[in-house]
Amino acid sequence: MSQSLANALQPIHWPLLVLVSARVVGLMLVAPIWSLTTIPATIRGGLVVVVSLAILPSVPETPVSVDGISIVAPLATELVLGLAIGLSSSVFLAGVTMAAEVIALQMGLSLGVALGGMADVGTPGIGQLEGQFSLAVYVAVGGHLALLAALARSFHAVPPGGALALSAGGRALLDAGGSIFPIAVQIAAPMMVALLITNIGLAVLNRAVPQLNTMMVAVPITVSVGLIALGATLPFAVDFVGKWAANAGNNADLMIRAFTPVVVR
């Protein structure tokens, strides 16, 4: 054990470790990869401990009050900031999922869910494919590690237990949530256009040949066109997702700065 970590683990620093762990827990709850429910809870808990111990020696010395209920408010602020840092990346994957659901609906793969209103039905296969594809690019570029680096930097911008600029941070979170739809449109636009042209062609065919059962023909055609368009646009999607993943750390830094209170000199 290094000397710096041994000093950080002295009993006097245990309240500080609790606050650091709260911010790490917030990130682990929503951040891509780290929040996967397929990872057992024991492993995720172990990751929280390991990451907290790795960050603790670099955290600035901050006096922490542990007088009963006074620790509750600092824990809540740490959890909120960790959630905000994680959401700075997870909103992009939410946009990818939305794009995949729209594409699956246009292809006819989720008509049963749309018409039947079955809320407990899982994400269509296209959505799972797009989500796993985005996660793979995210990990390959190192976005999950950039997010942890941004988390470590956040303790210098906002010391543990410090006050947060909740109004500015709340606006930043709303702006991040509002970016889900533009992201979904950028990803789904090529396939939406291809499927729209296909549906227009089927409508013209139905008018020209009324005897043809267009509904029977439409489903295999739209599914085929959608899959072909999906394969053709994958190289462009790799570039789009890769640029976002490479910028994950900068996006997290912007979110942290939004929550950093302005010091009036």
Image (tube, grey):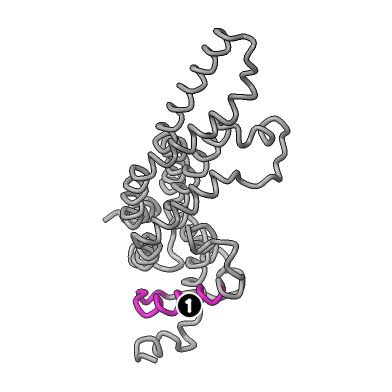
Q: Is residue 105 above or below residue 231?
A: above
Residue under pointer 1: 17
Q: Quadrant of residue 107?
A: top right
Residue 109: where, in percent of width, then height? Answer: 61, 36
Residue name at image x 71 percent, y 35 percent: 117
- Assess whether residue 48 is covered by the magenta stretch: yes
Magenta range is: 45-62
Q: State the image coordinates of residue 229 (x, y, percent, origin top left).
A: 43, 35
Residue type at mark 1? Leu
Report if residue 260 is visible in the image.
no
Q: Quadrant of the N terminus?
A: bottom left
Crowdedness near tag 1: few (<14), some (14–19) or many (≥20) residues, C-alpha within 10 Å: many
Q: Residue at x 45, y 89 (%)?
A: 10
Question: Which picture quadrant has residue 63?
Answer: bottom left
Residue drawn at (48%, 27%), measured in percent from left and top?
Answer: 195
Q: In the rendered image of this protein, does residue 12 appear above or below residue 102?
A: below
Left or right: residue 216 versus residue 179 is right
Looking at the rendered structure, the secondary structure element under dot 1 is helix
59 w.r.t. 140: above or below: below
